[in-house]
Image (cartoon, grey):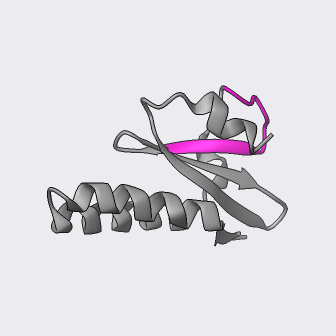
Amino acid sequence: MDKKVVWTEQSFKDIDAICEYISKDSKFYAYVFADSIFEAGESLKAFSNRGRIVPELMKENIREIFINEYRVIYNILDDIVEVLTIIHGRRNAKKILKKIK
């Protein structure tokens, strides 16, 4: 059975900030980025366990998938996949992820 995908306010803020940065060079690629993030998020409806466990947290229910160099971090609940945040893979994620713990 498919789960419902819920996007947190933080995940929308992250997408907006990343798209704003990308759009300085190309509005087209900013759109492509946003589209790929939302497509990947929606694919979690049926395949929520496909991502790896976030190594900084080591919690079975908090996982991530990679879209290009970005980490899409999500929480698997009973019938919901909650997209928590999107961060660049080169950023030090420990400080950001402390909020999730």
| Residue 18 versus residue 68 in the image, above or below | below
Q: Quadrant of the N terminus?
A: bottom right
Q: Position of residue 75 (x, y in %)?
A: 73, 52
Main SS of the magenta part reads loop
Describe residue 17's horizontal placement relative to residue 82 as left or right. Answer: left
Q: Residue at x 66, y 26 (%)?
A: 55
Q: Position of residue 82 (x, y in %)?
A: 69, 61
Q: Residue at x 49, y 57 (%)?
A: 14
Q: Residue at x 34, y 43 (%)?
A: 68
Q: Residue at x 52, y 63 (%)?
A: 13
Q: Nearer the viewer, residue 95 or 101?
A: 95
Q: Quadrant of residue 9?
A: bottom right
Q: Position of residue 43 (x, y in %)?
A: 52, 63
| Residue 72 versus residue 58 in the image, above or below | below
Q: Position of residue 100 (x, y in %)?
A: 75, 45
Q: Quadrant of the C terminus?
A: top right
Q: Which residues are magenta?
A: 56-65
- 64 in the magenta segment: yes
Q: Quadrant of residue 90?
A: top left
Describe residue 39's horizontal placement relative to residue 4 as left or right. Answer: left
